[in-house]
Image: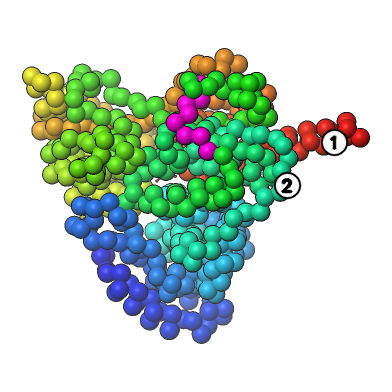
């Protein structure tokens, strides 16, 4: 990343607009691919590693426009094929190129309800941007049209102009839908079912809505304000919200139907059960699951040291175990909470890391140290039961395994000591068994994920499920896609019932 300032990037874009605007609709593909890709302005790494403000600052209008002019408006839309919710990407981009932002928002919202969120956190480089014709022509996926950044620009424009529309709601049907869990899957179901005129209640275990968007993904990647705005829309639609309500404990899932009169339930409880390494020393004080660490930092505001109810003690040297986005978020959060040294300890090399390239680049810029081909063997404590250091071992890469990535092979007698006082385990999450244990007829697979059919219907009549509780730890856009499908099936089921009831009455 080049570290041009916001102002420099805006100035460059203005010059490009002057050069290209007069022929906006007449450029040949070759000419469009010559327009330089627009870099995302970002906070200075030294400054941002000490604050929680958003790292990426968003395109200026000129940057968005010039980036949109790079799109070739392909006939075979590989970007749409690769988008999990099939946004009509060239159409919205064409509106951006012509400064028709209202229409651009409209096109995106035909398919995706949360563009400000998806524009920020979707892994576009492996989805819509992966096979973009421009990236292919330039033989570099990083030079594809920046679809995600344009999506974010459009959504931010809508928010900034205060034009967020409250969807129209059909007349009340008298039917009640319960949504369990308020992550992206649950939020989408709530909106889509409420639009049909059904009474919708969201039941959420935490005291705030948003799921991982709120408690997992840190503010420096996804500001809470954006989640709040989406939830405000649901409130304005009269969606009922019950927080601090743990379904399976506060009330059984089936009781919501049998005792509380809900006609359909959507289960979107996510994959919130942290996995551990199973090594010696994981119960020492100073070992956290990434879930706990990030929840305390984000949801419980641990960074607000003087005021937080559950502050995290000051760490000096932190090891983060894992190589995915969760590991990147934990490492970057630890740095912001004041750690001097943060090491990401990963068994393979950077090439095999599942984390987004951009997040790894940002982490490096912020001073996170990467210890590749290493792993923890045991964690050692002092006489007070606190982490004192971690014994690590070294690996080399062998043959590819089932995932296609080269297998890490342990180097015998390669043990060494890493001086750390905090260890954050970020090696994955499983599904919480609470609901399946208290709903015996609900079929789950061997990992505890709920089994659904192609309409997201579970083995129990009137109960649907989607998102991470079905897919295992996946992505925001996939969770939203499943929510959409489930809401469509619920709405169809209830519409048929209403029709039957009407016929019976006549
Ligand atoms: C740190 C982190 C970073 C990530 N970064 C990205 C990223 O950059 N891009 C991306 O696309 N994806 C990312 N993901 C994955 C993504 O956030 C998830 O795939 C997505 O949030 C799943 O949505 P969901 O609606 O299925 O569940 P969740 O978002 O997990 O929400 C489930 C909700 O259900 C509630 N709940 C659970 N049990 C109960 C119960 N019994 N009763 C009531 N409520 C309950 C939970 O409290 C939670 O609020 C990240 C995940 C993590 C943990
Ligand atoms: S593939 Fe790329 S260039 Fe073609 S329409 Fe999609 S975004 Fe535009």
- Asked which quadrant contains residue 503, the reply is top right
Q: In the rendering, at what x and y percent does residue 269 appear?
A: 49, 31
Q: Is residue 123 above or below residue 376?
A: below
Task: Tell me: residue 498, above or below residue 47.
Answer: above
Q: Nearer the viewer, residue 405 or 129?
A: 129
Q: Is mark 2 within 8 Å of ligand 1?
A: no
The residue positioned 54% from the left and 47% from the top of the image is: 235
- Structure colour scheme: rainbow
Quarter in which the N terminus is drawn: bottom left
Asked if the stretch drawn in magenta spans residue 22, the answer is no
Considering only vertical position in the picture, is 271 above or below 281?
below
Mark 2 packing: few (<14 Cα in 10 Å), some, or many (20+)? few
Report if the CB atoms under discs 2 and 1 are less than 8 Å apart. no
Q: Main secondary structure of the magenta part?
A: loop
Pinpoint residue 100: horizontal percent, then vertical percent.
56, 71
The residue tagged 2 is 171
Q: Is residue 463 above or below residue 229?
A: above
- Classify the position of the C terminus by image quarter: top right
Please say whether residue 165 is visible from this viewpoint.
yes
On the image, numbered disc 1 is attached to which residue? 502
User: In the current view of this chain or complex, which residue is farthest to the top?
Assistant: 440
> Considering only order in the chain, which callout, 1 or 2, is on the residue closer to the N terminus?
2
Q: Residue at x 82, y 37 (%)?
A: 499
Q: Quadrant of ligand 1?
A: top left
Secondary structure beneath disc 2? Answer: loop
* Element class at badge 1: helix
Magenta segment, which residues? Answer: 241-248
User: For the residues marked 2 and 1, what is the alpha-carbon distance in whole angstroms?
Assistant: 15 Å
Q: Residue at x 49, y 67 (%)?
A: 161
| Crowd band around label 1 with a 10 angstrom C-alpha radius: few (<14), some (14–19), many (20+) | few
């Amino acid at each position: 990343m080049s570290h041009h300032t916001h102002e420099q990037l805006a100035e460059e874009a203005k010059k490009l607009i002057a050069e290209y605007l007069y022929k906006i609709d007449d450029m040949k593909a070759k000419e469009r691919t010559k327009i330089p890709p627009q870099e995302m302005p970002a906070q200075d790494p030294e400054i941002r590693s000490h604050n929680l403000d958003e790292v990426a600052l968003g395109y200026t209008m000129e940057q968005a426009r010039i980036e949109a002019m790079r799109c070739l408006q392909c006939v075979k839309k590989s970007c749409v094929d690769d988008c999990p919710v099939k946004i009509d990407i060239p159409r919205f981009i064409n509106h951006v190129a012509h400064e028709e932002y209202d229409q651009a928002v409209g096109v995106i919202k035909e398919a995706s309800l949360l563009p400000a969120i998806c524009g920020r956190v979707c892994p576009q480089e492996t989805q819509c941007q992966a096979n973009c014709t421009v990236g292919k022509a330039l033989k570099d996926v990083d030079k594809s049209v920046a679809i995600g950044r344009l999506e974010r620009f459009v959504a931010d424009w809508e928010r900034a102009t205060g034009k967020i529309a409250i969807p129209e709601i059909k007349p009340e049907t008298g039917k009640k839908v319960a949504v369990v869990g308020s992550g992206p899957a649950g939020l989408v179901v709530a909106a889509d079912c409420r639009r049909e005129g059904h009474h919708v209640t969201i039941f959420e275990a935490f005291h705030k809505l948003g799921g991982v968007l709120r408690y997992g993904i840190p503010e420096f990647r996804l500001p809470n304000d954006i989640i709040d705005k989406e939830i405000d829309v649901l409130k304005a639609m009269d969606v009922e919200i019950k927080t601090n309500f743990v379904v399976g404990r506060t009330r059984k899932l089936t009781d919501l139907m049998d005792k509380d009169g809900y006609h359909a339930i959507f289960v979107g409880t996510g994959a919130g059960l942290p996995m551990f390494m199973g090594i010696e020393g994981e119960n020492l004080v100073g070992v956290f699951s990434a879930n706990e660490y990030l929840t305390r930092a984000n949801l419980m505001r641990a960074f607000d040291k003087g005021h937080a109810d559950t502050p995290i003690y000051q760490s000096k040297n932190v090891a983060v175990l894992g190589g995915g986005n969760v590991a990147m978020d934990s490492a970057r959060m630890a740095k912001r909470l004041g750690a001097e040294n943060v090491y990401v300890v990963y068994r393979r090399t950077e090439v095999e890391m599942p984390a987004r390239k951009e997040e790894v680049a940002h982490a490096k810029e912020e001073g996170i140290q990467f210890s590749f081909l290493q792993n923890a063997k045991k964690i050692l404590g002092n006489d007070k039961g606190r982490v004192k250091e971690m014994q690590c071992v070294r690996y080399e890469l062998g043959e590819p395994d089932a995932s296609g990535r080269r297998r890490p092979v342990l180097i015998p007698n390669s043990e060494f000591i890493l001086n750390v006082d905090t260890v954050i385990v970020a090696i994955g999450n499983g599904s919480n068994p609470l609901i399946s244990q208290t709903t015996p007829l609900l079929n789950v697979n061997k990992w505890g994920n709920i089994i659904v059919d192609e309409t997201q219907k579970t083995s129990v009549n009137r109960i649907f499920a989607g998102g991470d509780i079905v897919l295992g730890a996946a992505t925001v856009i996939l969770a939203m896609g499943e929510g959409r499908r489930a809401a469509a099936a619920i709405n169809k089921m209830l519409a048929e019932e209403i029709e039957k009831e009407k016929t019976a009455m006549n």
